[in-house]
Image: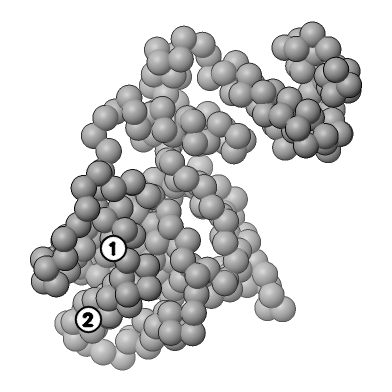
Amino acid sequence: MKTVILPEDLIPYEKADVLAYDYRAQQESTKQQVDLSMNTFSFLMEGYKEVHSDIKSTAISNTEFLLMKAGKCLMTEKLTGTNNSYRSVLFFFPNEAVLQFVKKYSITLSKNIERKTIQPIPFDRYLRTFAESLTCLDHLSSSNRQRVLQVKFEELILYLIDNLGHSFLESLITSVNDYDLHFQQVIENNKLNKLTLNELAFLCNMSLSTFKRTFEKQYRVSPSKWFQERRLEYAAILLKNERKRPSDIYLEVGYESLTNFIQAFKSKYGVTPKQFQST
């Protein structure tokens, strides 16, 4: 699958500190590999969006929008509404813009803030109007459009700080420097998301062969075996604690057929799922 690089693939000839793009689609996409070279506000106006990042997965309708940290993610876009369409107003900005904002307004940032790669934020009337305003600047000269977008960036951040506090800003400029810890975070946070090894390798910024070697070095078992164990453990929780039927959960825990799920479960626990529930 080809990786989409944003904003470069959408706005190939425009080089600026802050960029806006009114993105529309008439076809759905599933787990498209996306490399964000800049932080991005994705104001979802129409449709449904699901994003898997290295440490978080989230899904939203057009009652929310996303703040996404620069990096790699898997993106699903689905069409909704009477027009059967998808629309997202994208607002791109670099970490340097955040740091300049912090300096200009003398904001003191906390240390050791939790790193968040995706943050869903509820829409309100002001924010929806703001998103639409970003699409009304094409008649301006390139230099004046850039000046206006920089002012709009400050406007948005000031509004969000007043509503959300500083934490969303702090998490944008928090990075991870521990290679092994980051790898483990990707694995642990996506262990039940039914991602392929290729997709996990992409989120780790690795080739598939490097991903497999790193996995076996850290976990002392093959990736397929490890993920199967975690999903069967999750299945046991669903069977015992939530009293779900095997036929209701086999797809959820990553099996294409009920028969294969029963065989794998019995191999691990020594009993069938129904027998496990009755003990």
Q: In which quarter of the view is residue 184 placed?
A: top left
Q: What residue appears at the point 20 percent right and 57 percent down from the top-left corner? A: 109
**Colour scheme of the picture:** one colour
Q: What residue appears at the point 65 percent right and 66 percent down from the top-left corner? A: 79
Q: Position of residue 175 (x, y in %)?
A: 25, 43
Q: Nearer the viewer, mark 2 or mark 1?
A: 1
Q: What residue appears at the point 43 percent right and 57 percent down from the top-left corner? A: 119
Mark 2: few, some, or many residues within 10 Å (few <14, many ≥20)?
Answer: few
- Viewer-proximal residue among 201 and 112: 112
Q: What is the number of callouts on the image? A: 2
Q: Which residue is mark 2?
A: 151
* Three-letter code for the amino acid on which mark 2 is drawn: Val
Q: Position of residue 133 (x, y in %)?
A: 38, 86
Distance from Cα at disc 2 to Cα at disc 1: 19 Å
Q: SS for tag 1? A: loop
Q: What residue appears at the point 78 percent right and 37 percent down from the top-left corner? A: 242
Relative horizontal placement of residue 41, taking residue 141 as reference (left or right): right
**Vertical placement of 56 versus 11: above or below?**
above
- Viewer-proximal residue among 175 and 52: 175
**Vertical placement of 188 versus 7: above or below?**
above
Q: Position of residue 207 (x, y in %)?
A: 40, 28
Q: Which residue is mark 1?
A: 166
* Three-letter code for the amino acid on which mark 1 is drawn: His
